[in-house]
Image: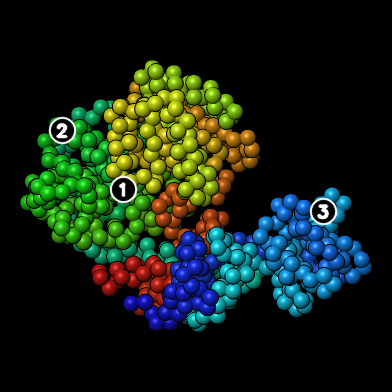
Amino acid sequence: MRPDILNPLFAEVETLDGVGPKLKKPLDKLGLTRVRDVAYHLPDRFVTRRPVANLDEASVGEQIVVALTPTEHRASGTGRGPYRVLASDAVGNICALTYFGRASYSAKKLLPVGEQRWIAGRLDEYGQMLQIVHPDHVAETSEGLLATLNEPVYPLAAGLTQPKVAGLVDQALARLPDLPEWIEPGQFTKTQWPAWADALKLAHKGHHPAARDRLAYDELLANSLALMLVRADNRRRKGQALHGDGRLRNKLALPFPLTGAQQRSIREIEGDLAQDTPMLRLLQGDVGAGKTVVALEAMLVAIEAGCQSALLAPTEILARQHYETLRTLAAPTGIEIALLTGRDKGRAREAILMGLYDGSIDMIVGTHAIFQDTVTYRNLGLVVIDEQHRFGVSQRLMLAQKGRVTPHTLAMTATPIPRTLTLAQYGEMDVSRLDELPPGRQAIDTVVVSAERMGEVVDRLGAAIAGGAQAYWVCPMVRELESEDIAAAEARFAALRARFGDDVVLVHGQLKPELKDAAMERFASGQARLLVATTVIEVGVDVPNATLMVIEQAERFGLAQLHQLRGRVGRGTAKSVCVLMRGGELSETGKARLALMRETQDGFRLAEEDLRLRGGGELLGTRQSGDTPFRIAELEQIERLLPLAHDDARLLMERDGGLASERGQAARTMLYLFERDWGVQLLRGG
């Protein structure tokens, strides 16, 4: 149960004054549904203003507070242009206060001719005249405005204003309870950070690096501690030691020999399976490094030892692909493999459920449908989770309850993740890395062209399609608005379809699953030649006949994601090409990123460089990773503070008596505050 002391923070946002149904919508958009969310809605930046006695004391481009007296109101002749209020300062300098659109209505009321007003805003120049466009504040006296000399600027959604958000933040901060300190005393003294509530208040008041660090550290500590509790719980649970005798693995006829990295990973997994503590291992493989074969070998060990294996995929398309691949590879072994997705109904579903219950099915592949309550296993020994980062810890815990004893877990991710972020997202999971490509995989030619050469790219695409090849066209990430990404994809699809007809299909995140699957199916089977998509095709689509990948506005993507997208081609025997189309305005980071893509195909190197270049946006960004664990901690803080938080969590567990001690009780409150309470639940359930 959540401690009562936190109840004021977890009250609905409607309990704040002034929040009704109209305001709730934009607040929901920002994820501000409870008082706690508002308190943690930190400013992006601060506007610093200087009070001046007259305009002679100010420079153009500066944010100021000044007393002005309106002398004349000027509307544009057409009614469409700007509305200007001319006003003079104490020494007679004239400045135009300029308003556009509907704002002109308020200007008439706010700025009566002949009455002095205090104005806050940015001083600019228009032609020969000084002007302030849309003053931030207009007040009758100076008192109120002197409080805005250092003003926070908050992230907004349509329907919200800065003053409105600032008012809600003040209300939320007024409700902060007095919480006990959870940071290790030595660490707290050394850093001289403010206490929790003080840090939150300071972070809203101005540029306070120590306060921001303290808040980021709390979040990192909560995450590290929760992952450690998962780990400790896993070690306490009784698993079953699985010893395979090799009889099934010896029958495999793999299309090419295993790489050194694959052999090493298989040995590491085999060693874990032989222990009676349940395995919790992460298999990181670069694009095309052969993770599926490693997973198959691991699942065969479990089956040789008399258990069942399950492979969990994030989407139905991926589940079907894994099923086909595993069935082909494992055919010589004679094991029984089944596929179960949410679509399976009636008799077919009953037959699969029966086979899992009586043990006649050795291996099941599917979406999360394979862990619903109705599914019972005779003896589940190993669970393989593909694209681990799309599954939360809660789902992992659900799996643990499925076996008679806790099954071993192997998580696979196709995104090479730098060490720091592995620690942040997975805690101290054991990691196996596949950092060699299988023999026979051809390098992919990567070329960068400017968007002005779009016509040439489309001609080349036409030639590839006419020659029997298939291609992908990935549309840009327009902004943080998925709707705009989809609009961009739909427009490109319409243009390409006008040229290539029914050979083109479209896939994006908001299509109904059955439509998305149907389009992917047409492409995978070769009926469609060109797949236009947003970034939904990033993981796992395997079409060996696809040899051309076009990525529009490639500079908008991060390196890890470009690498993932590039990895969709080069899966067959034919030479593949990846075309990175860039826009006109390239930042230095954008240039460096595209140059690196041309230079290397090593995903681990690209992931490290990405982190250095741009703060790992898409390694931790919500868009790509499904659910980033952090809302407050920024990448630079994660790299700097995570090792400290990790050690702090370990001290609490190993030296300071865990959650039962006095500091542990404070830490328990912290876990609930950051909603890492699955860590606490384990203690009660385990």
Q: Secondary structure at mark 1?
A: loop
Q: Amino acid at mark 1?
A: Pro
Across and down, in percent, residue 590 comes to: 59, 39
Q: Is residue 486 above or below residue 97?
A: above
Q: Which residue is mark 3?
A: 125
Which quarter of the figure has residue 116? bottom right
Image x and y of residue 18, in percent: 53, 75
Say which quarter of the image contains residue 568.
Answer: top left
CA gap between label 1 and label 3 equals: 55 Å
Is residue 391 shown left or right of residue 211? left
Under circle 3, the secondary element is strand
Q: Residue at x 69, y 64 (%)?
A: 105
Say what amino acid the circle numbered 2 marks.
Ala
Which residue is at a point 48% across and 52% down the rendered structure image? 621
Are circles 2 and 3 on residues that touch, CB within 8 Å?
no
Mark 1 = which residue? 314
Closer to the chain start, of discs 1 and 3, is: 3
Q: Earlier in the sequence, mark 2 or mark 3?
A: 3
Give the residue displayed 77% in from the left and 58% down from the top: 75
Q: Residue 342: tell me if it is visible.
A: yes
Residue hosting label 2: 331
Residue 252 placement, left or right of 195: left
State whether residue 436 appears in this view. no
Query: Gap between marks 1 and 2, in whole Å?
Result: 24 Å
Q: Residue at x 45, y 53 (%)?
A: 622
